Image (spheres, grey):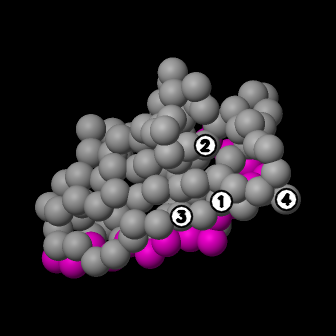
Amino acid sequence: QVQLVESGGGLVQAGGSLTLSCAPSGRTFSPYTMGWFRPAPGKEREFVGAITWSGDYTYYRDSVKGRFTISRDNAKNTVTLQMNSLNPEDTAVYYCAARESAYGSIDSVGGYPYWGQGTQVTVSS
């Protein structure tokens, strides 16, 4: 059983920053990719960004490029989502996800079998 534990959500004013973390636990787990998703109008969840477990590659949706950064902390075995210049449109529950396969679209919800419980991010105007 693989569990993903998220932390770091909260309330911040527009223009502020938050850092989310995601730590896998449970059975020995070697994900190929760790991703972040959030709900969106008309969609169950939309892709925010992802990182390969090696840390070599990162991917972002256009609306967060230049503001959000995904990184991997090898010492803590966690993935972080650093969110800067937050705006009210970023308000959502953010979900960490993981997949062991290298195949399929990195931004596809269906490609990730493992999900965290979600952490709330609220940005006030």
The residue under label 3 is 6
- Is 109 a magenta residue? yes
* Residue type marked 1: Leu
Question: What percent of the width, then of the height, locates residue 48?
Answer: 48, 50
What residue appears at the point 34 percent right and 75 percent down from the top-left corner? 10
The residue under label 4 is 1
The residue under label 2 is 34
- Element class at badge 3: strand
Q: What whole-number distance in Å separates the C-alpha atoms at marks 3 and 1?
A: 6 Å
Q: Is residue 88 above or below residue 3?
A: below
Q: What whole-number distance in Å separates the C-alpha atoms at marks 1 and 2?
A: 10 Å
- Element class at badge 1: strand
What residue appears at the point 17 percent right and 73 percent down from the top-left corner? 13
Q: What whole-number distance in Å separates the C-alpha atoms at marks 3 and 2?
A: 12 Å
Q: Is residue 123 above or below residue 54?
A: below
| Lower sequence index among marks 1 and 2 | 1
Residue 4, numbered circle = 1
* Residue type marked 2: Met
Contact, CB < 8 Å: mark 2 with mark 4? Answer: no
* Residue type marked 4: Gln
Contact, CB < 8 Å: mark 4 with mark 3? Answer: no
What residue appears at the point 27 percent right and 45 percent down from the top-left corner? 67
